[in-house]
Amino acid sequence: MTPRLQRSGEMPLPDLLRLAELALRGHANPDLLEQLLRATVEETGSRAGVLRRGDEIEARWPRTISPQVEASTEGWSEIPFGADDHPWRLRLLGLERLDEAALAATSLGLRAWGLREELKRSRFDARFHLWELEAIRSIATGIGGILDTSQLAEELINHLVALLGVRSAHLYLGEDAGSAVRVGGFGTPVIDAEDLERAWQHGIYKDELVALPLQSETGPLGVLAAAEKEARAGTEAFAANDVRLLELFAVQVTVALEYARLTRESLERERLNREMEVAAVIQSHLYPQGFPEFAGFRLAANSSSSRQVAGDTYDVLLREGNLFVTVTDVSGKGVGAGMIASGIHAAVRLLSGRIDKLNDLAMRINQYLTGATADNRFATFGMVRISPDGSFHAVNSGHLPLLIRRSGGDVDEVVSSGLPLGILEDARYEQAEGRLDPGDHLVLYTDGLTEAEDPDEEEFGVGRVVDVLRGLVNPTAESLCEKLLRAVDEHTCGEPLQDDATLLVVERLAD
Amino acid sequence: MNEEIKLSKDLLGPGLGLIAAAGYINNEGGQAIADAATQLMDEGAKTLLIDLDGTRIINSIGVSILLEILERTLDEKGKLAFCNLTPTISKTFEIMGLVQYAEVYPDRDAALAALGGDATT
């Protein structure tokens, strides 16, 4: 039952003004409604009062009203007032006097108070949206350049915690849910391995927890989780707008992670390219910068690499009045092959002239190389020592035949006498002997030439090399090189060689 | 990373109250600051300086509570000032309208010099 408004005379003007002044006061004191109610209770001579808005009790006076007293209907006057959108109800216990003017003043004041609150909320919401935009902009421009995932996570989490108003937010990254680790976070982590797996697959959308997978084109990169959304007092359920914001954050961090990954890969490629360039420069200095003067002989060479650092190398040097020429082809390509080729190159320079028999020299290099290469690489090796009178000694360790084109066009071969270097520690080799007469040519080459393929994938082969040599007429070292390379180029129809290729020619000049 | 609020308050001089708050300013941290502000104002402080050295994150509820403190100080014809804001919090205050009516100083010394307090307190 709602008691009717009791009237016991008009309220004095000062009391009305006091009520109106309180109601219209502009500050944000959360006790305002209580002050207003207290004034109303005192000015109307009531014993107690309760102010309701809708179903909510906004104020009690005195604060110590017992629930029993508040629940009873005896002695209470219940006075509804305010517009439809502000359904205020005033309950006064033991009301002595209240008139329409007092109610109107209170109603007007409460309505003004409500409008001010609404205006403040609207302003706050509008500014909060700006805050959201600023955070997104800040994340896009800020974490976009961060390559360290921990730092990236901290930046992201800070913004997320602030905007969502959560007590817990964490970022997990990994190849899959099982291996994902927490790279950053705020507050107490609230998801376990099972939740992480579920979030990785489908995401988790609960009142108290939202965990989203970071979806990239190649699949999830991780999980972004937020929990315990704060209310003014305690916590509340995540709203749709919170989830939308979290999804936006997840997209941002995914883009940033992808950017960081691509940047790291690009930097790594650049670093490797720089290293390759440096290695290529170092290796280029290992090739003879010019040929030594060796009376009665003339040399020509050509070497090309399918990569910046070749597995092929050759050398020409004078020791004890003899000319040493070598050719080496390391299995594989790139920096690893180039380093081994350089090692053999250094060993040849060190040992040439100190060891009489070339097969012994090859065995020493083989012993050094066997076991010294971690990835079971090996090297084919050919070496020829030429005396000023044209006599020569040669060793061929697993290499293609060393060719001697006689002045009349015939071609002799020094074939391999054993395994390539680096395979078997106690491998043995034979030393061959021969003689270069005036007009003869010694031809050393690598399989980059003989394995050059035509469009039908047929290799050039040693046979064609021999054919070219036989077909030459009075060649010089230089012209032999040119014509052999041209024949290979015609065979491949101009396609670049797929492997490192080296050609070294020694011509004994005609008398 | 857990950042529970660490708070201290002091009445520095005639009408000037200092609140130093370090940690997450959320509903609990914000309310702790509001309670400290109320006590200082009850003790006669008209001007409040809130030093946020050590505070990196403030959420929307924390901001709304600071706005209420600002309104109360203005209502009492007083003044609210902040110092030691991180760039992110400074930007947030700017967006949320706090710096329109509150004063912001780079550090406590600068704030006390401007507000007339003793920096050594």
Image (cartoon, coloured by chain):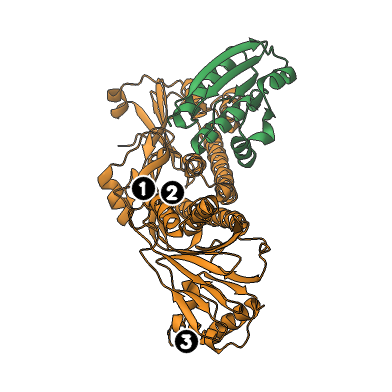
Chain colours: A orange, B green
Could you tell which of marks 3 and 2 lies nearer the N-terminus? 2
Q: Chain of mark 2?
A: A
Q: Is residue B55 left or right of residue B99?
A: left
Label 3 CA crowd tier, 10 Å (few <14, some 14–19, many 20+): few
Q: Dot 1 corresponds to which residue?
A: A210
* SS class, disc 2: helix
A433, above or below A15, in the image? below
Give coordinates of residue A187: x percent, y percent. 40, 34
Q: Residues within 10 Å of mark 2 (few under 14, many from 20)?
A: some
Q: Which residue is under mark 3?
A: A455
The residues bearing labels 1 and 3 have C-alpha atoms spaced at a distance of 59 Å
| Subunit under mark 3 | A
Which SS class for mark 1?
strand
Which mark's residue is nearer the viewer, 1 or 3?
A: 3
Q: Residue at x 33, y 36 (%)?
A: A2
Which numbered mark, 3 or 2, is in the foreground of this view? 3
Disc sitting over residue A187 in the figure: none
Identify the residue at horizontal 57%, vertical 64% (top origin): A387
Q: Amino acid at mark 3?
A: Pro
Identify the residue under disc 2. Answer: A242
Have a look at marks 1 and 2 and say if they share a chain: yes
Q: Quadrant of residue A77?
A: top left
| Quadrant in the picture for the C terminus of chain A | bottom right
